[in-house]
Amino acid sequence: EMKRYNSQKKELKVQLLEKEPEFNWKVFWIFFNPQLSAFLAAVLLAVGAAILNIHIPLMLGELVNVVAQFTREHAGNYLCEVKGPALRLLGLYGLQGLMTSGYIILLSRVGERVAAEMRKSLFVSLVRQDIAFFDANKTGRMVNRLTSDVQEFKSSFKMVISQVARATGVADEALGNVRAVRAFAMESRETELYTVEVDKSSRMNESLGIGIAVFQGLSNVALNCIVLGTIYIGGSFIANNDLSAGDLMSFYVASQTVQRSLANISILFGQVVRGMSAGARVFEHMVLEPTIPLKGGISIPLNLLTGHIKFSNISFNYPTRPGHVVLKDFDLVLPPYKTVAIVGESGGGKSTVAALLERFYDPDNGIITLDGHDIKSIDPSWLRGNAIGFISQEPVLFGTSVMENIRFGKPDATDKEVYEAAKMANAHHFITNFPDGYNTVVGERGVTLSGGQKQRIAIARALIKNPRILILDEATSALDAESERAVQDALDRATSGRTVLIIAHRLSTIQNADIICVLSNGNIKEMGSHETLLKKEGLYSELIKRQRTNEQK
Ligand code: ADP
């Protein structure tokens, strides 16, 4: 048992290691290209600041020489002599400061804009992925891509560029260090949330950390020795008048600048590695193409649409669970204007039939047609948005007004259309009884609705687009008797004149359906009206009996 667990764990690790994507320069360029001129300006300013930085120690040396001369000779006008080099130095300081802030401003602009564009485009590409993609990927991990990966990429990006300048000797290190600290803090937050990724990143960071530490330690020792040596040897040169005090000062300041630059380069190295892998993870999802597109294909004129649906020879297993066959040689016809209910054991695949009709997944085998057209040739957004209304009776309402929640079914609906749909769904009355009426905000910070009220709003949301086909995925839990009646009443009205597929998790509500189908072992085993199936004394009457005994318990 333990051995099996260990080998599974190893397998998972190997998969994760293999999965680490490569950095995609082509995609990076798409985002970077629009910022190119700002970027080049930043580099120019940074290099300018770096050149000034080389001049500053020299000017400083000149100044020190004037001071030294006066300490030795006490002759002439000190203030007059010192004014020239001091003013020039002051000018250089000012110019260097301006250039430094200039390139930092430009770089943050470039970084922020690239990151914002990346976030938007990543969101767009995530949202259009197949449902199977969301089965396989935890939402948390994707939100992470959207936030911390982009953030990490951005900050290392900014740091890399500002270090271009620093490598040549720019003195200001505050920015880089702030960023490095922030990046580490982010690592630690990830650590709490994503245990698996932790192993990987900590191992990497540890070796990076060792590398950085050794590099910094050695360069510190080396540079401090240079400083010591400079003063030690330089002192004797000065004593012999071979070297001026100013030259020594220049050298001293310059060597300190170099030291800081080297320290930054080592931090930069770690940041580049992390930034590249964060960027690679982000780009990986951007270039991912869904197998079922959101748009594209034919649409049937609504006045010609009858809503005749046929499932032929369907086989299906969920992409995340290969080998677990849900539907096999499944056939089903939904005749126009009829109500067909699917019953069967829980987990038997009833909701899967609805998911295939909505084209959340494509079947592995077989074909589903609407009015004779393969649904693969039909525009999925038309199919979901105009042809089919889906009422899940454990509905999701959004944290906005009742009005907006209903209008969600048809974004361009007028207020009047919203009221009509609500009336049809038995919802108008209770909505107008709220103090804010249709402007009542529901959900987290708004009014909490009862189960029955939520369902009726969901029914109104489906009815507002006046769909030819209606899918009702029944609630698994019962409502109180009064709500149940109100909801059932709304549903009875909603189903008339439409092709209706009811996914029945309970049996009590579907006895009036035109056709009841019993799904078992992946396909339909029995079919007929409630009475015919009862008389047959097969699977259906067995299910009814079992439910009765369950209710009596
Ligand atoms: P029912 O509606 O009859 O209760 P479902 O269609 O929901 O059954 O599920 C049929 C089978 O498919 C079950 O074994 C279930 O565990 C599995 N299943 C359902 N949804 C998914 C999914 N998104 N990913 C993987 N397996 C799923």
Image (spheres, rainbow, N blue to C red):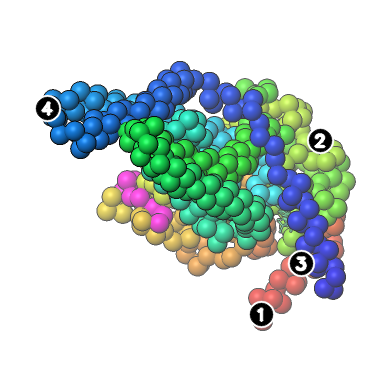
Query: Residue 450 sits in which quadrant?
Result: bottom left
Amino acid residing under circle 3: Leu
Q: Which residue does the image show at 70% across and 37% down from the upper left? A: 22
Image coordinates of residue 375 in percent, x first then y, are: 73, 31
Residue 424 position in % (x across, y down): 46, 44
Q: Which residue is mark 4?
A: 77
Instruction: State the residue at coordinates (51%, 57%).
Output: 189
Q: Residues within 10 Å of mark 2 (few under 14, many from 20)?
A: some
Mark sitting earlier along the chain (4/2): 4
40 within the magenta span: no
| Depicted 521 relative to depicted 312: above or below | below
**Residue topped by disc 1:** 552
Q: Which residue is mark 3?
A: 543
Quick check: is the Cβ at mark 3 less than 8 Å away from ligand 1?
no
Q: Main secondary structure of the magenta part?
A: loop
Q: SS for tag 3?
A: helix
Packing grade of label 1 (10 A; few <14, some 14-19, many >=20) is: few
| C-beta proximity under 8 Å, tags 3 and 2 | no
Query: Residue 449's quadrant in the figure?
Result: bottom left
Q: Going 53% across and 20% down the picture, which residue do you hit?
A: 33
| Residue carrying label 2 | 367
**Is residue 442 part of the magenta span, yes or no?**
yes
Say what amino acid the circle numbered 2 marks: Ile
Which label sits in the foreground, 1 or 4?
4
Disc 4 marks which amino acid? Asn
C-alpha separation, residue under disc 3 versus residue under disc 2:
29 Å
Mark 2 lies within 8 Å of ligand 1 (Cβ measured): no
Looking at the image, residue 202 sits to the left or right of residue 189; the answer is right
Q: Which residues are magenta?
A: 437-444
User: Label 1 to label 2, Cα distance in Å?
Assistant: 42 Å
